[in-house]
Image (tube, rainbow, N blue to C red):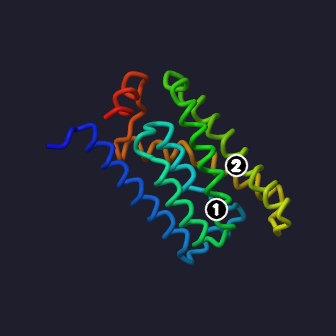
Amino acid sequence: MIDPVTRHIWTYRLLYLALSLVVIAYKLLPLSLGSIGLPSPDILLALTLAWLMRQPAVVPMGAIILVFLLADFLFQRPPGLWTLLVLLTSESLRRRRAQMTEFPFLVEWSAFAGAVFTLLILNRVALWVLMVNQTTLGLTLVHGIVTVAIYPVVVAVSKFLFGLRKLGPIDSDVAANP
């Protein structure tokens, strides 16, 4: 019989991969929803970091690499650059997560916002060094703002629709060592 904690972790890992593939497939559809003037939020990033900050065991490093490398190839971004930046950011948040378990949602949201803007700026700097054509800085910052604004919605859907709750300090010790 499978231990309930292990079953919980693997169920959410598979759900994360399935949701990530749905988000990638949705972004590939020619729906032209971005015609209102705002860039679309990076739901894949919001989903990954939200699930990582709530239950780090359900978003392993290999899944992040697989999902974001696939997204790099399909969205025609420089292969591996965004993946590397997201991986470094997610591991940094995973290390600091134990300190943020007892803080309110606004602290978690501000950590997410800081991570998103750090990612966007590091990505722009790397693309600038490589002399790749980029969008304007204002459009990049608006993309970051929209991504940060969608984070509470992603957390609410994760919590109320999928039942992914934020682990406390004692719970995270149990989940880290199934």
Between label 1 and label 2, give the one nearer the viewer.
1
* 60 and 117: which is toward the camera: 60
> How far across and down, in percent of the image, does residue 24 sit?
51, 66
**Residue 146 falls left or right of residue 8:** right
- At 35% from the left and 55% from the top, the residue drawn is 14
Label 1: how many Cα within 10 Å (few below 14, some 14–19, many 20+): some
Q: Quadrant of residue 36?
A: bottom right
Camera-nearest residue between 140 and 16: 16
Q: Which numbered disc flags the more N-terminal residue, 1 or 2?
A: 1
- 152 vs 79: above or below: above
Please give the residue where the numbered disc 2 appears in the rendered image: 119
Q: Nearer the viewer, residue 81 or 38?
A: 81
Any mark on residue 80, and which? 1
Up-down relation of residue 80 to residue 150 (above or below): below
- CA gap, disc 1 to disc 2? 13 Å
Image quarter hosting the N terminus: top left
Check disc 1 and give the amino acid type.
Answer: Gly
Which residue is most to the bottom? 30
Circle 2 residues within 10 Å: few <14, some 14–19, many ≥20: some
